[in-house]
Amino acid sequence: MTSSRLPEPIALLPYVGKWTLLAGLVAVLSGTASAFFLFALDYATNWRESHPWIIWSLPLAGFAVGWIYLKLGSSVEAGNNLLIDEIHDPKKVVPLRMAPLVLFGTVVSHWFGASVGREGTAVQMGGTLADQLTHVFRLRHAERRIILMAGISAGFASVFGTPLAGAIFGLEVLAIGRLRYDAIFPCMVAAIAADQVGMAWGVHHTHYHIGSTAPIDFLSVSAVLVAGIVFGLVGMAFAKSTHAASGFMKRHIPYAPLRPMAGGVVVALAVWWLGTRYIGLGIPVIVEAFQHPLAPRDSIGKFLFTVGSLGSGFKGGEVTPLFFIGATLGNALAPLLHLPFALLAGLGFVAVFAGAANTPLASTIMAIELFGPQIGPFAALACVVAYLFSGHCGIYRSQRVGLLKHRLPPVARDRQPPLS
């Protein structure tokens, strides 16, 4: 209820006007930053592919990224987790330096051949630039939470070209089992507008073709359920492995710049042995997963390359590598589950991400935006099952447990993390 004497729809107009303006500003900032980032990433990737010898300089690039973060970025090194922490417990505005540092770190990581993604960079830039409006408009803590969420949504939407998934991601990623509906309008406006801003700058996103799907019957639903379990377990393994690798490097290599340097040596040697198939974003291989059968080793190779790169301290993100892992894994599972390989590649694309990030709704919507509405029922089932079977861990350490995923027997319940 409202204390205003005006009818509620009329009293709501100032709120809508205010957040349309703020979310629009966030969209312009984030969409422009993402466009610049994607153009820089394309240039770095093309240059690396034309000069494959550059991989031998990856250890030096890793040292440079680690040293710059040690000297200039210690307060923002937590990246996405810092944004999530500030939304949960607002303390101070995220330093503006986060945006150029993560941009530099990610482009250098890709330029020299690390296996990292791009969503982390876009989300961090979007959140950081959005948070700078806190001082300009003297926003309160509650309003600051909302504008940070809008920045996350705008960054995610503009880097992948999925505005609806981006909006829901900003609401869903903060806590397992809980959505923040107080930010739904700003997140929607920011995500949709940021995607349009990116396209206005000339950004083009990769298109994937599923083709024919499968009838919704007992056999196909059962096969997707089994696939969802596998996708969830792989998402959980990825999150745990990345955290374990990071912890191992911090325990055994105290000097931060030496961690990505050591990781760069390992990745460079692995490329010398296995080739360049598993470095960078891996978009060409993802596209292949929708076109013809692939070897099962592709998902394992990308898994190991990405864990080694991110765990040692290279910058970027986890999501595009998760798309690679999921698409190639789904492709490999198709003959076993008697489903079209393009369909299972699409389901793996989104479901491994859903399990690793604990974002089943955003992942389902992403599948519909990328592959078309016909995949919706299967994508929803695969993403929800993957979410359930990935446990209560995830790629974002600051993500809280708002509500347990399922009811457990007393013994198992005692081992679950406390609610936040």
Image: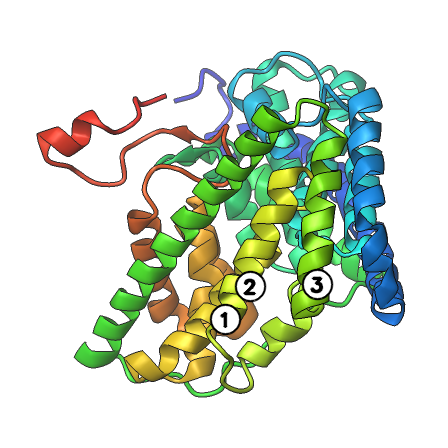
Q: Which mark is residue 301?
A: 2
Residue beneath the point at 34% across and 37% down: 392
Residue beneath the point at 30% across and 70% down: 224
Residue beneath the point at 89% across and 67% down: 51
> Depth check: 379 or 181 in front?
379
Residue beneath the point at 48% across and 33% down: 174
Residue 117 in the image: x percent, y percent? 66, 52
Please, is residue 101 above or below residue 96 in the view? below
Observer-side mark, 3 or 2, equals 3
> Depth check: 241 or 30 in front?
241
Cβ–Cβ below 8 Å for labels 3 and 2?
no
- At label 1, which amino acid type do we have? Arg
> Depth check: 216 or 66 in front?
66
Residue 295 in the image: x percent, y percent? 50, 78
How are the residues colored?
A: rainbow
Cβ–Cβ below 8 Å for labels 1 and 2?
yes
- At label 2, which amino acid type do we have? Gly
- At label 3, which amino acid type do we have? Val
Q: CA distance from mark 1 to mark 3?
A: 15 Å
Does residue 258 appear anywhere in the picture?
A: yes
Q: Which mark is residue 297?
A: 1
Please, is residue 72 above or below residue 308 in the view? above
Q: Label 2: how many residues lie within 10 Å, few (<14), some (14-19) or many (20+)?
A: some
The answer to whether residue 289 is left or right of residue 160 is left
Does residue 217 appear anywhere in the picture?
A: no
Residue 49 in the image: x percent, y percent? 83, 69
> Depth check: 294 or 85 in front?
294
